[in-house]
Amino acid sequence: VQPTAVIGINEFLAAMSKIIERDLRGAYTLYRTPMPSYRELVSEIKRGAGQRARFVNVPTGLALAVTRGLERAGIPFPIKPGQIRALSGGPASKSNLEELLNGS
């Protein structure tokens, strides 16, 4: 189950306001915790649009093999092998969202 980093526009704007107001410097990683799975996220978006989501589970190894083959053959495809590898790893760093919004 792949966790997916998401943030609402109001949360993003509130976090950005705090960064600007406090004259904070540096890099910030902003996403909600706990992270929903990709399946949960897409299902909720589809439900909001009055649609039903349909999923096809594709093993990571198969997805990598297919995208690598398409890449080698020069066939355009919207998903690259590097994207699949990145999705398999989860987020690279913890979210700063809660500490920005709830911190002093």
Image (cartoon, rainbow, N blue to C red):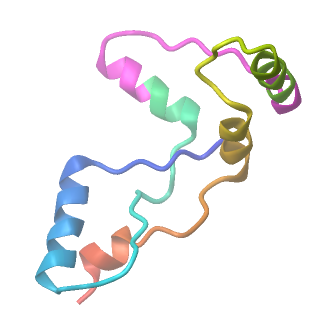
Q: Is residue 81 above or below residue 5?
A: above
Q: Residue at x 88, y 30 (%)?
A: 61
Residue 1 visible to an observer of this rendering: no
Bounds of the magenta segment: 44-63
Q: Is residue 62 left or right of residue 98?
A: right
Report the number of discs: 0
Quadrant location of the C terminus? Answer: bottom left
Q: Position of residue 87 (x, y in %)?
A: 66, 43
Magenta-colored stretch includes residue 50: yes
Extreme bottom residue here? 104
Q: Residue at x 75, y 22 (%)?
A: 71
Residue 21 visible to an observer of this rendering: yes
Q: Position of residue 12 (x, y in %)?
A: 25, 57
Picture quadrant of residue 76: top right
- Viewer-closest of 22 and 31: 22
Q: Is residue 54 above or below residue 44?
A: above
Q: Residue at x 82, y 21 (%)?
A: 72
Q: Is residue 89 left or right of residue 53?
A: right
Picture quadrant of residue 31: bottom left
Q: Residue at x 56, y 35 (%)?
A: 38
Q: Is residue 18 left or right of residue 70?
A: left
- Viewer-closest of 11 and 80: 80
Magenta-colored stretch includes residue 85: no
Q: Is residue 75 above or below residue 63?
A: above
Q: Position of residue 90 (x, y in %)?
A: 65, 53
